[in-house]
Amino acid sequence: MIKSIKTLSLPVPTRSENFNLFFQSLERAFLTKKINDEYKSEILINLLGERAHNVLLYIKEEELNDYEKLKSIVLREFQLTPRECLNSFKNAVKSSGETYIQFAARLTANFQYYCSLRKVNSFESLCDLIISDKLFETLNKETATHIGIREAEDWFRPIDLAKECDIYFSSRSGSHKEIPITYGYTQDPFKNRSQKL
């Protein structure tokens, strides 16, 4: 059973950005071979081999038999941050043994994974994400670091990112002038995004 799953799925990745592709292919193999849920965790641990050692050190016994929990722990251990995932997508190049169809599929999967990490599920939120990413790219390193810390696991919608930048620059210049809350701004920078999604 493990051998046939191994044949139908991608090999365990050596680079973090490929774990999403690995899990997509693994789950497709599970469907193709009609693998029962009770065996999925065991197969995953077997496929991970030595890479599973770190995960097995701190996993709880009840999580060991739950594929979805085990998968989330593996992803948490090996996955890139959303910002690293975006940079990986932007810096991707076609491998020498890769066809353009394979390269396009890899780019598509990586971008979809980035969108899933950012919890983008509508055209409007995708537009906001692209605009926010572009705005973030224009920031100097110090400001980008500050914004990255403020964002933590989430991301700012464009208007809220602009507000955060204005507040940061205002505080850095020594000005104590308050920036008014105007159209689109909220006290909670993530509030607008959850309402629009």
Image: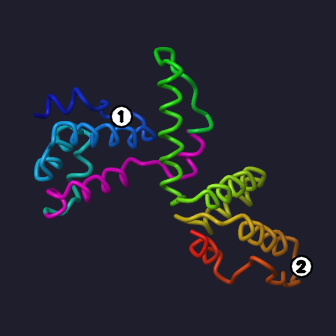
Amino acid of disc 1 = Pro
Q: CA distance from mark 1 to mark 2?
A: 50 Å
Residue 182, x across and y down, in percent: 81, 81
| Callout in the foreground (1, 2) | 1
Which residue corresponds to the image point at 26% horizontal and 49% vertical from the top-left?
A: 54
Q: Against 110, is 38 above or below?
A: below
Residue 188, x across and y down, in percent: 64, 80
Residue 154, x across and y down, in percent: 55, 65
**Residue 174 located left or right of residue 25:** right
* Residue 13, disc: 1
Q: Quadrant of the N terminus?
A: top left
Please report the bounds of the magenta region as a residue range: 62-88
**Secondary structure beneath disc 1?**
loop
Q: Against 71, is 26 above or below?
A: above
**Secondary structure beneath disc 2?**
loop
Q: Against 14, is 161 above or below?
A: below
* Tag 2 residue: 175
Which residue corresponds to the image point at 62% horizontal and 69% vertical from the top-left?
A: 150
Residue 170, x across and y down, in percent: 85, 74
Determine the residue located farthest toward the top in the rendered image.
97
Query: Is the stretch drawn in magenta largely helix, strand or loop?
Result: helix
Is tag 1's residue or tag 2's residue first in the polypeptide sequence?
1
84 part of magenta stretch: yes
Amino acid of disc 2 = Ser
Q: Residues within 10 Å of mark 1 (few under 14, many from 20)?
A: some
